[in-house]
Amino acid sequence: MNGNFQKLKAVRTVLLLFLTLVTVLVVKSQDTVRYTLDEVIKIAQSQSPDAIMARHRFRSSYWGYRSFRATYLPGVTLNATIPNLSRSIDPIDQPNGAVEYIPRSITNYSVDLSVSQKIGFTGGEVFLSTGLVRQDNYRKNFISNNDTVTRQFVTNLINIGFRQPIFKYNPYKWERKIEPMKYEEAKRAYIEANEDVAITAVNQFFALLLAQIEVDIAYKNMANYDTLYNIAKGRYRLGKIAENELLQLELNLLKAEATVETADLNYSDMLFRFKSYLRLKDDYPVALIPPVITPDFSVPVQQAVEEAKTNTSQGLAFQRRLLEAESQLNRAKRDGRFDAELFAVVGLTQTSDNIPEAYKNPLDEERVTLGMSVPLLDWGKARGDIKMAESNQYLVMTAVEQDRIDFEQAIFLQVMQFNIQQKQMLIAAKSDTVAQKRFEVTQKRYMIGKVNDVLELNNAQIDNDNAKMGYYRSLMDYWKNYYQLRKLTLYDFQRKMRIFVGFEDLIE
């Protein structure tokens, strides 16, 4: 039974080595694409799904802001009716006192061109218009049995007027303050989304890098344990080691072979996720270059807080939320109270049965309307709306105050985390060096017979693997904290400058 097991193990080992050789030959036959962390971040910020969605969210905000600005530009409108036809039977008094019902058909044609301009400061509107109306009147004459046709032209040469609410809530006044803030907030949110993409790219990069390192460690350990097991078999035959030590090394070899399979599967999964996020279409092998050189600088806490208040979308959102609450309170105080609106228009008009005469000797026309609305009894609705708006404003002020405290605390913790990261990396790098040296010494001593305890060799190998993985995880934490700090402050403390993006390239 033991002999069959030994044959099965030997066959499995040969198959694994064969598959490894085939994999190496396939990889060497293709061009391996190597990526640094900076290259991966640039690709992610260019073509990843998150980057594409962020660009379209910004474009939506941009066109919303353009639409807002367009409301303050002069609007030109052309209205036309061709035609407006109506048929009716009208009662007509006859000379003998009788009433006769006569069929009548009226056709109207009209065209009107107007230019209007909103006045944001007052909430009013001025307009300028000109127009022409043609009316054709067909009436049946039963006495003469003939149709009577009359045609009339009415011209409005020019009308100049304005419409001005006096006590109403002025939405344009508040929009001119809030909408530019929303657009600026959208610009900052896009930069933050860009940094978010960088953080995700860091995660994807190191997830694949760790999987890549795990594969290297797994194959290296399998080769080491295969060598140690073959040496142990010779020592066992000579009676230099006990059977349990040989069995332990055999078990270690089997575990190493299983770890190789698991590491390969995990690497394939991480490689798929990596290529999927970066939208890489080719099937070339990928090799990642670890960013072993990290910028060494510290970040002042107070400067980070001030930069965050000045640069980030959240810092601007605090101001916008307070302004919106103030706007809603102003609306509650203005609407539903004493309202008045002034409408005035002056112009020149004329009528004739032909177009040339309709434009001669125009007559002046004036219209002035002052409308008022006074609620006499609303059962306290207006007062209730005001009280609700006041309470809402107080809630917003309280929430903003608390959010500012939490915001500053989050920045403080992030800065502290980043500032200690460099020291933690040095410790992790030292631990990796020490563990690797210890494993190499223990392995050599075991191979020459000076260390007979296989558990000591196992512990040295486990510590070595953990230390190596720990170093790269520390490296990953450093870069995640680095880009997280950039996102929270929108400031590059390494170059000592604000983070900018060319927004013109985003707008098509």
Image (tube, grey):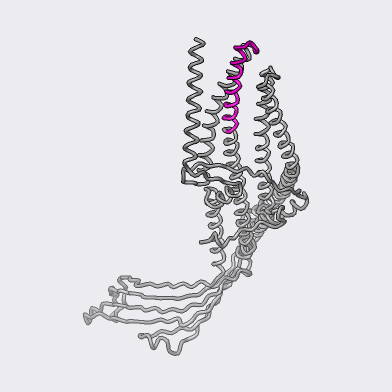
263 or 2: nearer the eye? 2
| Above or below 444: residue 268 | below
User: Can see residue 336?
Assistant: no
132 or 237: nearer the eye? 237
The quadrant where residue 95 appears: bottom left
**Residue 397 horizontal/vertical position (percent):** 71, 51
- Residue name at image x 55 percent, y 67 percent: 71
114 or 229: nearer the eye? 229
- Residue name at image x 58 percent, y 60 percent: 503
Residue farthest toward the left in the current orientation of the protein: 145
The mark total stands at 0
User: Can see residue 76?
Assistant: yes
134 or 252: nearer the eye? 252
Q: Would you say residue 227 sits in the magenta stretch?
A: yes
Q: Would you say residue 259 sits in the magenta stretch?
A: no
| Above or below 255: residue 62 | below
- Residue name at image x 72 percent, y 56 percent: 496
**Residue 497 horizontal/vertical position (percent):** 70, 57
The quadrant where residue 320 appears: bottom right
**Residue 476 horizontal/vertical position (percent):** 65, 41
**Residue 377 horizontal/vertical position (percent):** 62, 57
Locate residue 177 relative to residue 361 in the image: left or right.
Answer: right
The secondary structure making up most of the magenta span is: helix
| Above or below 172: residue 194 | above
- Region rendered in magenta: 216-242
